């Protein structure tokens, strides 16, 4: 049995049916996982919006200080922040005018909150937690 929020069928569905990823906690440093994963996904045809409170541009892409500042649709909110920030981040997502566009809340390795996950599911979103977007994409391709 798969751990909660890591269902391969859900992961495959999300990756096949989305294009726009808001990367919360996207680092401007090339040695950081958020930078590497975002760059990799862009190379695979996804649009990855960097969300960082201070950086103005990351790897030639305009950076947005908050999710609410992202100008386009958001299919996946991909989180590279500590688990403790997930409740506040969920409140930010729920306040978005484009919230109905959000299809998936995805958190990277070691980022997990069962209450946040259930609330996201209750809003009709897919939830993937404690999983790397890049690694899961590679699994599907092999």
Image: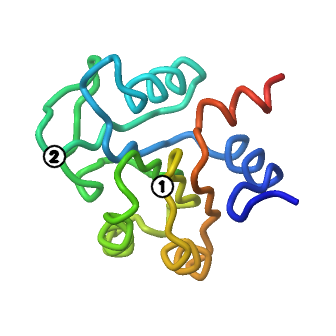
Mark 1 to mark 2 CA distance (whole Å): 20 Å
27 sits left or right of 23 in the view: left
Q: Do the residues labelled 1 and 2 touch (CB within 8 Å)?
A: no
Question: Does residue 115 sit above or below 93 in this rendering?
Answer: below
Residue 72: give x, y in percent of width and height: 37, 47
79 sits left or right of 3 in the view: left
**Residue at the image position 14 percent from the left and 33 percent from the top:** 55
Query: Which element is circle 2 on?
Result: loop
Residue 120: give x, y in percent of width and height: 54, 73
Which dot marks residue 72? none
Residue closest to the eye, 99 or 111 = 111
Q: Earlier in the sequence, mark 1 or mark 2?
A: 2
Q: Mark 2 points at which residue?
A: 53
Question: Does residue 66 sit above or below 116 in this rendering?
Answer: above
Q: How crowded is mark 2: few (under 14 residues within 10 Å), some or many (20 or more)?
A: some
Furthest residue toward front: 110
Question: Does residue 48 sit above or below 111 in this rendering?
Answer: above
Residue 135: give x, y in percent of width and height: 65, 31
Q: Name the residue under label 1.
A: 111
Residue 7: give x, y in percent of width and height: 78, 56
34 sits left or right of 88 in the view: right
Question: Does residue 31 sit above or below 111 in this rendering?
Answer: above
Residue closest to the eye, 9 or 3 = 3
The N terminus appears in which quarter of the rendering?
A: bottom right
**Residue at the image position 54 percent from the left and 27 percent from the top:** 41
């Amino acid at each position: 049995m798969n751990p909660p929020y890591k269902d391969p069928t859900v992961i495959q569905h999300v990756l096949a049916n989305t294009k726009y990823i808001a990367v919360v906690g996207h680092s401007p440093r090339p040695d950081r996982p958020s930078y590497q994963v975002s760059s990799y996904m862009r190379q695979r045809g996804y649009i990855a919006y960097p969300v960082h409170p201070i950086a103005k541009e990351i790897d030639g892409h305009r950076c947005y200080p908050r999710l609410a500042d992202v100008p386009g649709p958001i299919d996946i909110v991909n989180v590279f922040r500590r688990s403790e920030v997930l409740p506040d981040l969920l409140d930010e997502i729920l306040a978005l005018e484009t919230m109905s566009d959000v299809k998936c809340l995805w958190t990277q390795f070691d980022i997990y909150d069962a209450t946040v996950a259930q609330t996201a599911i209750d809003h009709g979103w897919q939830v993937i937690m404690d999983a790397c977007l890049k690694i899961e994409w590679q699994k599907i391709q092999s």
